[in-house]
Image (cartoon, helix red, strand yellow):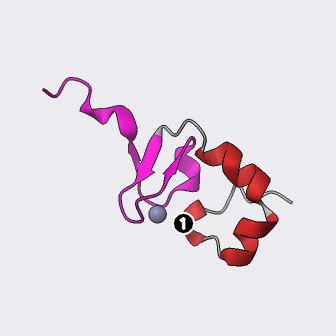
Amino acid sequence: MSKEEKPLCKWDKEEIKDNLKELKKLVSAPRFVCRKCARAARKEAVLCKPEPLDEKKGEK
Ligand SMILES: [Zn+2]
């Protein structure tokens, strides 16, 4: 069973515990941050309000 369809933001304690290994993969080397929940992940699909972490490129 994969949790990839469900945003990390919506995981509850049990899901985190049951999918800890996958969670670690998803949050390692994050490229996106959730603007709503302040979570970070490698794939934007797992965040409810993804925002690219490297968006500051070009600014200042
Ligand atoms: Zn979120």
Rendered position, 36 above or below 50: below
Quarter of the image for the N terminus: give it. Answer: bottom right
Q: Position of residue 6 (x, y in %)?
A: 65, 63
Q: What residue is rendered at 40% in x and 59% in y? A: 38
Give residue 5's quadrant in the image: bottom right
Q: What SS does tag 1 mark?
A: helix
Q: Nearer the viewer, residue 42 or 44?
A: 42
Q: How many marks?
A: 1
- Please state if 39 lies on the left or on the right of 4 as rendered: left
Image: magenta residue range: 32-60
Is residue 21 shown left or right of residue 37? right
Farthest residue to the left: give it. 60
Horizontal side of 32 relative to 18 (left or right) equals left
Q: Which residue is mark 1?
A: 9
Residue that sits furthest to the right in the current view: 1
Instruction: Say which residue appears at 81% left-offset and 67% top-offset.
Output: 18
Q: Is mark 1 within 8 Å of ligand 1?
A: yes
Question: What amino acid is found at the position of numbered circle 1 in the picture?
Answer: Cys
Q: Residue at x 60, y 40 (%)?
A: 28
Which quarter shows the C terminus?
A: top left
Asked if the magenta segment contains residue 39, the reply would be: yes
